[in-house]
Image (tube, helix red, strand yellow):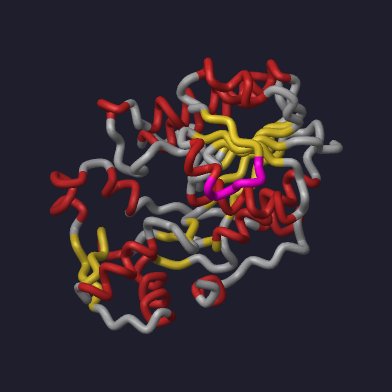
């Protein structure tokens, strides 16, 4: 497919920014859809900016007009902490928001849709994030738009609010809580590697549906990953196993999100895009 213009939703977010920059570097015409147009204009002063919200379908028609391909990176503010009063929930943003955007893209005549889903999504799990992302995946297919679904594991890099937050806190208070003993499995991927995978998906997008698990080259238990990250950054801290039941009354479902255990298979991804180098955790951490 010859791509003329690409819409990136959530272009001011952690992943969306990396994706937009990768596209611009390859000289794709990019349009940014963001709830915060003023922030988008500061980050991307030379790009076309459309203010809108995937949860508000009336704002999406203009955003999708004249677009050949849509990349859905939008996430609700404060993720993974839901705020039902402000409608910042998995169902309203990940599920219905993605459905809204896919329908708008189809109506506008776009030729392909790329969705950043999540590792472990399979239609069987009952956690709200898995249910929302499965709903979103099926909604995209329901429009009839050819789609590439990417299911990334833990994404880290400059600007992330997960691993970076842990490392910053460990500098201040050298004690890191390991929820559930840190036994859950993760396969961390550097954000620029994820952006390059999206870029390769754009370049090869056509009329077929594709689905890939996405992760770095190494699978770790959370405890091991944090040990490597702390050592790489020269931070001395103790890892303290904490039972999930002890802190769940305070943080609710977020505890299950942080401690979720998923195994992924990136061999189909590597076979399809053999030229993409996936950085090890140590390599990624050296970049920032």
Q: Is residue 123 magenta?
A: no
Q: Residue 25 occupies which quadrant of the picture?
A: bottom right
> Could you tell me how many numbered marks the image carries?
0
x 76%, y 31%: residue = 68
Magenta span covers which residues?
A: 42-47
Residue 238 is left or right of residue 164, and the answer is: left
Magenta span: predominant SS is loop
Closer to the camera in the image, 191 or 207: 191
Coordinates of residue 242 in the picture (x, y in percent) = 19, 62
Coordinates of residue 103 in the picture (x, y in percent) = 62, 19
Q: Residue 33 occupies which quadrant of the picture?
A: top right
Coordinates of residue 233 in the picture (x, y in percent) = 40, 79
Closer to the camera in the image, 195 or 242: 195
Can you name the residue that lies furthest to the right here? 2
x 75%, y 20%: residue = 109
Closer to the camera in the image, 221 or 117: 117
Reply above or below: 254 against 111: below
Residue 167 is left or right of residue 2, and the answer is: left
Reply above or below: 119 against 223: above
Coordinates of residue 281 in the picture (x, y in percent) = 51, 71
Q: Is residue 46 magenta?
A: yes
Reply above or below: 266 against 67: below
Question: Which quarter of the figure is the N terminus placed in?
Answer: top right
x 54%, y 23%: residue = 99
Residue 224 is left or right of residue 117, and the answer is: left
């Amino acid at each position: 497919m010859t791509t003329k213009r690409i819409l990136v939703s959530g272009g001011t977010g952690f992943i969306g920014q990396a994706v937009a920059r990768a596209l611009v570097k390859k000289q794709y015409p990019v349009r940014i859809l963001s709830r915060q147009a003023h922030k988008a204009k500061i980050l991307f002063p030379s790009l076309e900016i459309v203010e809108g919200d995937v949860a508000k379908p009336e704002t999406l028609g203009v955003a999708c007009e004249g677009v050949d391909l849509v990349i859905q990176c939008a996430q609700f503010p404060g993720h993974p902490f839901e705020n039902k009063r402000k409608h910042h929930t998995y169902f309203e943003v990940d599920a219905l928001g993605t459905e809204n955007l896919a329908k708008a893209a189809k109506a506008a005549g776009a030729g392909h849709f790329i969705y950043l889903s999540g590792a472990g999504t399979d239609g069987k799990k009952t956690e709200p994030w898995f249910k929302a992302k499965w709903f979103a995946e099926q909604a995209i297919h329901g429009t009839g738009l050819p789609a590439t679904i990417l299911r990334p594991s833990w994404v880290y890099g400059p600007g992330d609010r997960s691993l970076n937050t842990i490392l910053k806190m460990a500098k201040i208070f050298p004690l890191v809580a390991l929820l559930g003993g840190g036994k859950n499995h993760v396969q961390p991927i550097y954000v620029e590697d994820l952006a390059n995978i999206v870029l390769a998906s754009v370049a090869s997008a056509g009329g077929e549906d594709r689905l890939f698990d996405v992760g770095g080259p190494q699978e770790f238990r959370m405890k091991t990953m944090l040990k490597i990250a702390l050592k790489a950054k020269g931070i001395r801290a103790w890892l303290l196993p904490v039972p999930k039941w002890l802190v769940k009354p305070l943080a609710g479902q977020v505890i299950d999100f942080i401690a979720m255990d998923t195994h992924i298979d990136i061999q189909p991804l590597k076979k399809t895009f053999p030229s993409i180098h996936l950085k090890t955790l140590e390599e990624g951490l050296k970049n920032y």
